[in-house]
Image (tube, helix red, strand yellow):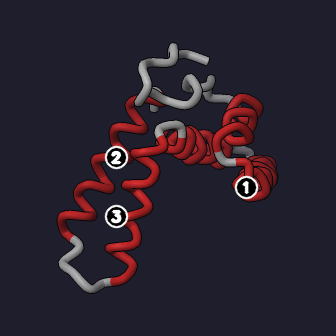
Amino acid sequence: MSEQLSGPHGPLIPMPELTPDALRAAASKIAPSRIPALTRHLFEATTNAQKTSSLAPLRAFVHSWAAFVAIERHPERAARLRELERIVDEGEADPAGALAEIQSIRETAETEAGL
């Protein structure tokens, strides 16, 4: 894992290496309910990589789950993302501000993950 824990509002866990095993271990600590989805995604990515003779599906898996872990390891950021997604899903207000903030959260997470 690549980052030290920081302060009371820091991440729950350090950012893991960008490997399926490390991402699974991290997800099991911060979002154990998501392990079945991670496992299905990894199985699909592996199958597609074999069928297409391409690493692209595995790269997409790592990208997706590294961003997920980078977001979820910060509970306040994860909660804010869920709130923003709820705002967009409900469609009651102009979603432009929420969509911009969602994009910012995702970009920050991708940067933290080294993507």
The answer to whether residue 55 of the structure is visible from this angle is: no
Total count of labels: 3
Q: Is residue 3 left or right of residue 29?
A: left
> Contact (CB < 8 A) between labels 3 and 1?
no
Q: Is residue 102 left or right of residue 49?
A: left
Which residue occupies 68% across, 41% down? 27
Q: Hey, what amino acid is under mark 3?
A: Leu
Q: Is residue 57 left or right of residue 102?
A: right
- The residue lying toward the viewer, choosing from 63 and 29, is 29
* Disc on the earlier residue, 1 or 2: 1
Neighbour class for label 2 at 10 Å: few (<14), some, many (≥20)? some
Q: Which mark is residue 105?
A: 2
- The part of the image, by quadrant, that contains residue 15 is top right
> Contact (CB < 8 A) between labels 2 and 3?
yes
- Residue carrying label 1: 33
The residue tagged with tag 2: helix, strand or loop?
helix
- The residue lying toward the viewer, choosing from 11 and 91, is 11
The answer to whether 68 is drawn above or below residue 82 in the figure is above
- The part of the image, by quadrant, that contains residue 109 is top left
Q: Hey, what amino acid is under mark 2?
A: Ile
The answer to whether residue 40 of the structure is visible from this angle is: yes
Neighbour class for label 1 at 10 Å: few (<14), some, many (≥20)? few
